[in-house]
Image (spheres, grey):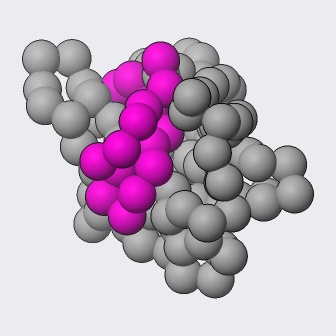
Amino acid sequence: EVQLVESGGGLVQPGGSLRLSCAASGFIFSSNFMSWLRQAPGKGLEWVSAVSTGGANTYYADSVKGRFTISRDNAKNTLYLQLDSLKTEDTAMYYCSTGRWGSGSRGQGTQVTVSS
């Protein structure tokens, strides 16, 4: 059974940083593209970023390019998302998922709130 557990969210001021983690189990992590998605209050699910199986190739939505960094540690079956220069519009529940576009299983999410 695929299990994805996100952590690392919290309340941060505009301009601040957070590092999200996603612990994966129940599947061959190193063989899968992995993605981050987010859902802001009252809005639909938005794809944020993806990373290839070995971590060499990364992809970002225009809204986060240059501010967020995705990475993975296949030895630890863990996916990361470094969030820098955070804006109030980044407030959302963040989910990790399998697949290039995050169309697979998702975890329960971790809340990121950007507010002064």
x 65%, y 36%: residue: 26
Question: What residue is rendered at 31% in x and 58% in y?
Answer: 101
Q: Residue 95's quadrant in the figure?
A: top left
Vertical position of residue 58 compared to residue 95: above or below? below
The answer to whether residue 59 is above or below residue 78 is below
Residue 106 lies in the magenta-colored region: yes
Residue 65 sits above or below residue 79 on the image? below
Judge whether 73 appears above or below 39 on screen. Answer: below
Q: Quadrant of the N terminus?
A: top right
Q: Is residue 112 visible?
A: no
Locate residue 22, reporting x and y percent.
64, 37
Is 33 displayed left or right of 75 in the figure?
Answer: left
Q: Nearer the viewer, residue 91 or 79?
A: 79
Q: Position of residue 115 (x, y in %)?
A: 43, 20
Q: Nearer the viewer, residue 10 or 37?
A: 37
User: Percent position (x, y) of residue 104?
Assistant: 36, 44
The stretch drawn in magenta includes residue 80: no
Residue that appears at 40% across and 57% down: 99
Report the side of 65 relative to 15 (left or right).
left
Q: Residue furthest front?
A: 1
Side (left or right) of 93 relative to 85: left
Question: Outermost residue toward the bottom?
Answer: 56
Q: Which residues are magenta?
A: 92-108
On the question of residue 105 being in view, the answer is yes
Q: Quadrant of residue 56?
A: bottom right
